[in-house]
Amino acid sequence: MKTKVVAIINQKGGVGKTTSCINMGACMAKMGKKVLIIDMDPQGNATTGLGVSKHVEFVNELGKKDVKPALNIYTVMCGNVDILNEEVIHHTEPAGLDIIPSSIDLSAIEMEMNDMPNREKVLQKAIEPLLGKYEYILLDCPPSMSLITINSMVAADSVLIPIQCEFYAMEGLAQLLDSIKIIKKLLNPRLAVNHVLLTMYSGRYKLHQQVAEEIEKYFGNKVLKTRIPVNVRLAEAPGFGMPVILYDKKCAGAVAYMRAPEEFLARESKRK
């Protein structure tokens, strides 16, 4: 089984990045793909959005129940635990979708990696044992061009950029693309922007139509034809710890997120 690693990136927050990661992954699993999400954001929204706890209960030396941080991508990147440890990878619904959680501790990794050799390649090295075990590994990156994001791009084969259909959508995009070019040139020659996903779209707003047209002019056929609509059920689903196809499979958001992975996978199947 060949594994494709996809970094889901946009340094602008609030563009539906984590929502897209969770729901693209869930719908791909529903289509029979074996998918792993790695939550690379210290906020851990993908973790809670799939109903995975950031803490585990244990009985302390006094015989009382207590809690401690669950094993997560931070403990893996620090070298404290093997990524194949059964407590690191969590199985979720739908079947075929797994996640490695994050925690707020990950925000300290940048300082801790300062003394690590090849610090930009820590994640790439860490996930090597997973290659061949999943068809797709989706990296949910933080909304910043941090060392965590750089590690994600170095580990990835390609990038998917979710872009909100709003006025500031293009702001910072040139900087993001410049960063991707630098990573490609210096650290990861296989890295490519293969997919752009338009999010929070409403055909009723002329502004959204105009932004969508501009993005399509800029990125051409890299833009998925499916546009993710503004949808209340999409916003509600993470609060129940599940992807939208399990929360309300008939809502507009669920329908769109079933179509987007179909497009994504059809395009990927044409790539070597």
Image (cartoon, grey):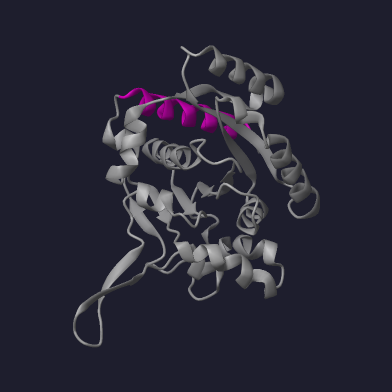
Residue 71 placement: quadrant: bottom left
Quadrant location of the C terminus in the rendered image: top right
Q: Total of numbered circles in the picture? A: 0
Q: Is residue 45 above or below residue 166?
A: below
**Is residue 2 among what the camera can see?**
no
Q: Provide residue 257's location: percent of width, then percent of height.
A: 42, 30
Magenta segment, prevailing SS (helix, strand or loop): helix
89 to the left or right of 151 = left
Q: Which residues are magenta?
A: 251-271
Viewer-closest of 125 and 149: 149
| 18 relative to 7 in the view: left or right | left
Picture coordinates of residue 221 (x, y %)?
Answer: 65, 23
The answer to whether residue 259 is magenta is yes
Most extreme residue toward the front is: 167
| Quarter holding residue 161 | top right
Give the farthest residue toward the bottom.
Answer: 61
Residue 46 image position (x, y, % from top left): 42, 49
Q: Is residue 209 visible?
A: yes
Q: Is residue 50 above or below residue 162?
A: below
The spot of residue 65 in percent (x, y) is 21, 76
Picture quadrant where residue 31 is located:
top left
- Within the magenta stretch, is there residue 128? no
Query: Looking at the image, which is closer to me, 13 or 126?
Result: 13
Q: Is residue 141 left or right of residue 187?
A: left
Residue lying at the far right of the rendered structure: 185
Residue pictured at 69% horizontal, 62% vertical: 120
Query: What residue is at 36 percent from the left and 37 percent from the top?
Result: 30
Q: Residue at x 71, y 72 (%)?
A: 117
